[in-house]
Each structure stands twice: as C-alpha cells, then as structure tokens.
C-alpha cells in the first residue's frame, strides 16, 4: 500500500521573486502558502518586480505571522503616499496552521523563511514560506559534489 504525501504548494502564476540561496543554505522540511497584507504602492512595486527577500525571515508573534527584513522598493509614482520599504508585513494563514507551525519552530529548532513571492490566478500576492533546518558545511559540499557528478553524467550521455 502506497503512502500518501501531503501536496506541497507550488508557486503558480506570475513569479515576482525567488529566494535562490534557500535551497543551498537550508534543508526544506515543509512548505506553506500565505497571503500578505500590502498597501497599494507595495502591490504596484511587486507587479514591477521590485522586491528582495534574500535576507528576510518569518517570525511568529502570538497567533500571527510577520514577514521581517523583506524590501519592497518604493513606487515612483506614489509620491507622498508611499510605503516604508523595510516595514514588517503581516501574513495571512489559517490559525490552526499557524499554531502547528509555531509548535514546530519552538520545539524542533526549525526556522521559517520565504521562498517565493508570486501572484496567483486571481491576482492576489502570495508568499511561499518554508520550515527549514540549516545545513552543515559538509552537507553543502556534498550537494555541490552531487551536482557536479550529475553534470558529468549528462555530458557523457550527450
């Protein structure tokens, strides 16, 4: 009898930004999708692709999730109604999911980081977050070695 795995959310729609270092620096344990509370000028900047999540992380405060350290560049045409580029942004998820994530972060020593920001089919800005465990240096070297071996094998086949 086959075991069923929980379907992992995948970014669908227009991808704004990806955290490219995440797969190298961390071992991904679980993925989740969250909505973001944004201001109008932030949405305009996102549609222009003006976001950086390389140094961002997700923090659990009470029963809420917050995106900290993400930079959304100011929108040029918003003049005085512009937003603070580094402000904390509230993430929207089901309370039961937030509680379950909070328990794992507290007890198992996992961290929450953003992986991808994208617009779904309905035009809503979504954030794919992941529960991760940091890789050791020898794990990173092993990944590099494995990738090099796969490239060599592909060259041999061609």
Image (cartoon, rainbow, N blue to C red):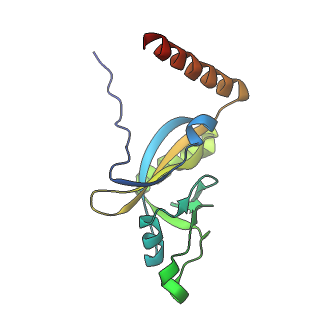
Query: Is residue 53 shown to the viewer in this render?
Result: yes
User: Residue 47: image x %, image y %?
Assistant: 41, 66
Which of the two residues, 130 or 147, is positioned nearer the viewer here? 147
User: Residue 113: image x %, image y %?
Assistant: 57, 49
Determine which quarter of the picture holds residue 86.
bottom right
**Residue 133 as seen in the image, left or right of residue 156:** right
Task: Assign the N terminus to one quadrant of the image.
Answer: top left
Residue that protrudes farthest toward the right in the picture? 137
Determine which quarter of the picture holds residue 35.
bottom left
Query: In the image, what residue occupies the spot 61% across and 52% down?
Result: 54
User: Residue 91: image x %, image y %?
Assistant: 47, 62
Task: Assign the C terminus to one quadrant of the image.
Answer: top left
In this view, 139 is above or below 22: above
Which of the two residues, 119 or 8, is positioned nearer the viewer here? 119
Query: In the image, what residue occupies the spot 53% across and 36% down?
Result: 28
**Residue 96 as seen in the image, left or right of residue 76:** left
Which of the two residues, 97 or 147, is positioned nearer the viewer here? 147
Query: Is residue 61 shown to the viewer in this render?
Result: no
Residue that protrudes farthest toward the top in the picture? 156
Residue that protrudes farthest toward the bottom in the picture? 80
Query: In the image, what residue occupies the spot 53% across and 62% down?
Result: 51
User: Residue 52: image x %, image y %?
Assistant: 57, 58
Determine which quarter of the picture holds residue 58.
bottom right
Query: In the image, what residue occupies the spot 43% across and 70% down?
Result: 43
In this view, 116 is above or below 135: below
**Residue 5 as seen in the image, left or right of residue 144:** left
């Amino acid at each position: 009898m086959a075991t069923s795995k929980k379907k992992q959310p995948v970014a669908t729609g227009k991808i704004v930004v990806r955290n490219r270092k995440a797969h190298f620096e961390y071992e991904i344990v679980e993925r989740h999708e969250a909505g973001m509370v944004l201001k109008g000028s932030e949405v305009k900047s996102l549609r222009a692709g003006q976001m950086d999540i390389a140094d961002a992380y997700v923090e659990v405060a009470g029963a809420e999730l917050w995106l900290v350290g993400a930079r959304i560049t100011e929108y040029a045409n918003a003049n005085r109604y512009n937003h603070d580029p580094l402000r904390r942004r509230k993430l929207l998820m089901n309370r039961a999911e937030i509680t379950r994530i909070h328990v794992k972060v507290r007890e198992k020593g996992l961290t929450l980081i953003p992986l991808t920001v994208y617009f779904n089919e309905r035009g809503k800005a979504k954030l794919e977050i992941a529960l991760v465990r940091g890789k050791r240096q020898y794990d990173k070297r092993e990944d590099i070695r494995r990738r090099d071996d796969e490239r060599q094998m592909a060259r041999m086949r061609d």
